[in-house]
Image (spheres, helix red, strand yellow):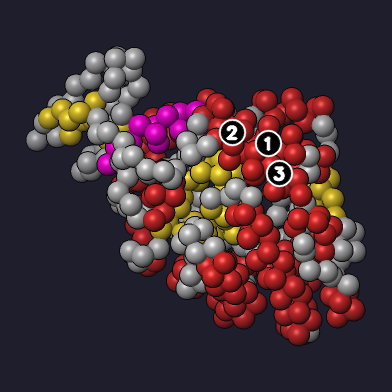
Amino acid sequence: MASICSSVSQSTPFLVPKSSYQFRSKSKFGSVRCAVGEIIAEPKSVVSSEPLLINAIKGDKVERPPVWLMRQAGRYMKSYQQLCEKYPLFRERSENVDLVVEISLQPYKVFKPDGVILFSDILTPLPGMNIPFDIVKGKGPIIYDPIQTAADVAKVREFVPQEFVPYVGQALTTLRDEVKNEAAVLGFVGAPFTLASYVVEGGSSKHFSKIKKLAFSQPDVLHSLLQKFTASMTSYIQYQADHGAQAVQIFDSWATELSPDDFSTFSLPYLTQIVSAVKLSHPGLPLILYASGSGGLLERLASTGVDVVSLDWTVDMEDGRRRLGADVAVQGNVDPGVLFGSKEFITKRIMDTVRKAGRSKHVLNLGHGIKVGTPEENVAHFFEVAKGIRY
């Protein structure tokens, strides 16, 4: 049977074959939702004291998937580029309350995502742990004294957020005041193995030979370092929650450089410790776990006890759903490269992802951060389509 859709808007709603998920066009006259052979009035929003993103993660009935994008505040935006001309140093921008708030809100003011993530970096806690670092334009993060020995690990202090990064707490509190509950304020931290990789390698790495040498030749040294990061990141998540973060994402970006067995030794136990401790102190705080290239580790990621596993684009969303089970929410997982395509192509990929994810416990996102050079108009289209979807 052909689909017969009608709208008072001049634009045509996008329909997904063999799916009841619909794209609602914007119109000054209102909007409708199309289904096969009928017109259905747009459903009223469910009244809730919490943002859509939090409700979706909890499994509450929502009318559409919430949407935000990793790295949604950053270099692809002209407003951010202009601010960088005035404040050229990354740490100058990321360690100043007013600038952190301004940058975090830049995409919110333009696109109105359902999540507003703190503008910061996973390495921000390092100076407070006696690990000097900087982020150099064109080079990325630089660790001035890479950790190599047990003596180096002994010098690492446990991180006390309120002492070393008070601007993070102040920024989160301000963001909550600015956004209220129209969107969820998101914090984030680096996972122990990923942080250890940076400080052992001395920065980013292609081969991770130094961290693996330490893991396989002096495992006790690495475990000692990982434990310090575990205690510190637990405190950091709790601090962020106490100052306004309504969900926190844990980035284990480099854990997928490990084999599944080595992941179970050098990453999984520490992630599980963090999740368990936070669930005791902040039982209502949703935790999201992201690891790029994690197709071989999905079941292990879910076993940490996190509320949401964020999938990258190399995992088929339908397969990821099946492997993770109904109790775990999913996030993702459109390829960031899709945003360089046509608007029709972007729409198709969004709808395909939403169809495969299903009607519950899905946060629409990219499978990785937005790439530099992504057209802003395509990001705007992504959000328009995503926010126009109705289950």
The picture places residue 345, in percent across and down from the top left corner, at 41, 34
Q: Residue at x 54, y 70 (%)?
A: 280
Q: Are marks 2 and 1 in contact (CB under 8 Å)?
A: yes
Considering the numbered disc 2 on the image, is that residue within a helix, a strand or a loop? Answer: helix
Position of residue 257 relative to residue 82, above or below, is below
Q: Nearer the viewer, residue 20 or 61?
A: 61
Considering the numbered disc 1 on the image, is that residue within a helix, a strand or a loop? Answer: helix
For marks 3 and 1 on the same chain, the one whose residue lies earlier in the sequence: 1
Q: Amino acid at mark 1?
A: Val
Q: Residue at x 51, y 71 (%)?
A: 304
Which residues, given as a range, are shown in magenta? 378-391
Q: Amino acid at mark 3?
A: Gln
Magenta includes 154?
Answer: no
| Whole-number angstrom distance, CA of label 2 to CA of label 3 | 12 Å
Label 1 belongs to which residue? 101
Q: Which is closer to the viewer, label 3 or label 1?
A: 3
Label 3 belongs to which residue? 170
Q: Amino acid at mark 2?
A: Glu
Q: Which mark is residue 178?
A: 2
In the image, taking residue 299 as reference, residue 221 lies left or right, namely right
Using a 10 Å C-alpha cutoff, classify the residue at mark 3 as few (fewer than 14 neighbours), some (14 to 19) or many (20 or more).
some
For marks 2 and 3 on the same chain, the one whose residue lies earlier in the sequence: 3
Q: Residue at x 72, y 28 (%)?
A: 81
Q: Main secondary structure of the magenta part?
A: helix
Considering the numbered disc 3 on the image, is that residue within a helix, a strand or a loop? Answer: helix
